[in-house]
């Protein structure tokens, strides 16, 4: 069984690795190695997406999904019952004699 402390340690290591990659990218860019720095940043971005379980979806794919949802067959509902007038019982009035 994994303890909460172990999970926090693992999280700490992951974040520390990401911070190291960010520092490396900054150093490369400052040294004029922009292309290499950008590559490190792209790799860091992918690592962060994996870490957060994000899925990269293109905008066109999102539109297709929305269209498919809209075109999905809708369940037919029963037609509403016509409103009926409540029947009133004739009141029997007994006359007093």
Image (cartoon, helix red, strand yellow):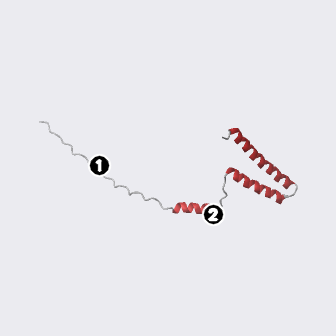
Q: Quadrant of the C terminus?
A: top left
The quadrant where residue 62 appears: bottom right
- The alpha-carbon separation of the residues under discs 1 and 2 comes to 55 Å
Q: Position of residue 51 (x, y in %)?
A: 70, 50
Residue furthest to the front: 1
Q: Which residue is mark 2?
A: 60
Residue furthest to the left: 97
Q: Position of residue 7 (x, y in %)?
A: 70, 42
Q: Residues within 10 Å of mark 2 (few under 14, many from 20)?
A: few
* Left-right relation of 52 to 87: right
At x 55%, y 62%, the residue is 68
* Left-right relation of 54 to 36: left
42 in relation to 4, above or below: below
Contact? badges 1 and 2 (CB < 8 Å): no
Instruction: Tell me the element at label 1.
Output: loop
At x 86%, y 58%, the residue is 33
State which tag comes first along the sequence, 1 or 2: 2
Q: Which residue is mark 1?
A: 86
Closest to the observer, 7 or 77: 7
Q: Which mark is residue 49?
A: none
At x 74%, y 43%, the residue is 12
* Left-right relation of 66 to 57: left
Closest to the observer, 3 or 89: 3
27 in relation to 5, above or below: below
């Amino acid at each position: 069984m994994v303890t909460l402390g172990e999970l926090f340690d693992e999280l700490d290591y992951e974040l520390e690795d990401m911070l190291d990659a960010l520092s490396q990218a900054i150093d490369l860019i400052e040294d004029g190695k922009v292309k290499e720095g950008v590559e490190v940043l792209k790799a860091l971005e992918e690592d962060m997406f994996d870490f957060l379980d994000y899925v990269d979806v293109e905008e066109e794919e999102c539109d297709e999904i929305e269209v498919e949802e809209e075109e999905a067959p809708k369940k037919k509902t029963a037609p509403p019952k016509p409103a009926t007038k409540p029947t009133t019982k004739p009141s029997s009035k007994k006359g007093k004699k």
